[in-house]
Amino acid sequence: MPRLPRPLLLLSFALGLGACRPDQVEHLENTQEIAREAENWSPKRILPAQLLQAAHWAGDSLTRTADRAWRAKLAERLRAGGVEAAHPYCQPEKLPQVVTLAHELEATPRRELLPARFITEADSVQVLRPTADEYVLRYPLVLLPNEVCLKCHGQVGTDLGPADAQLLATAYPGQKLTGYAPGQLIGRWNISVTRRGVAEFYTMKTRKIVKRRR
């Protein structure tokens, strides 16, 4: 097929444009929203300091979610049947809300029991980087002065009875779960998060959300 000379090609294009009536042209009203959304999904370079900040965000989000769900579940079980009914649920890392969030963050939360002592500055939140692809966050767990905590971990004879203390000793051999006072360190969260999970969480947290006009 012969090619049209350039002047004729431009003329035909101009005629084609002229054939469109104003009522046939659709003007986009949400161009700002489209531009913001395109910017959100464009590749971005995340700096090391931003990754560190996102690791803190991820750990904070996971521990807050665990704390709320954990205390609500334990309070419910304590009301239902005391320590015997509650202690099997003292595993916040296995609660559905925590499992779901940990999966989204590519995180593995674990807890460790620590000997009773009062918290110091050395027990503040720590972020470690054992490998280039992993962050490990450490959060102290402090015994709070409420019935949910003291009912299982407080002073025997004051906060819980000898029978409940024996029940816990039998269920968790080799672990000293009682005898703690409010304000003492009882354990620590160790949360491992992948670099990819941290980066995706940072991207999600920093996305620009356009407020829709009413």
Image: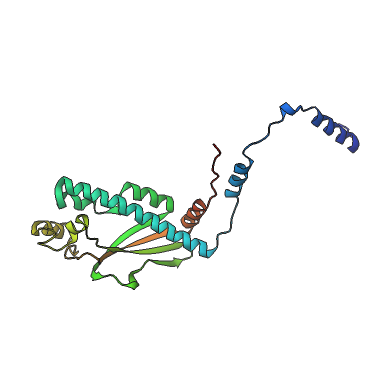
Q: Position of residue 133 (x, y in %)?
A: 47, 62
In the rendered image, the quadrant that contains the N terminus is: top right
Identified at 24% across, 54% down, the residue is 90
In this rendered view, identify the residue nearer to me: 42 or 26: 26
Residue at coordinates 43% horizontally, 54% vertically from top-left? 106
Residue 93 in sight from this viewpoint: no
Work out whether residue 170 can be spotted. yes
Pinpoint residue 141: horizontal percent, then vertical percent: 29, 63
Q: Quadrant of residue 29?
A: top right
Please identify the quarter of the rendering in which residue 189 is found: bottom left
| Front residue of this view, candidates 164 and 171 | 164
Q: Which part of the image, by quadrant, shows the C terminus?
A: top right
Q: What is the image's colouring?
A: rainbow
Q: Position of residue 173 (x, y in %)?
A: 17, 61
Is residue 64 shown left or right of residue 171? Answer: right
The relative height of residue 12 versus residue 187 in the rendered view (above or below) is above
- The answer to whether residue 108 is above or below residue 100 is below
How far across and down, in percent of the image, does residue 95 sit?
Answer: 30, 49
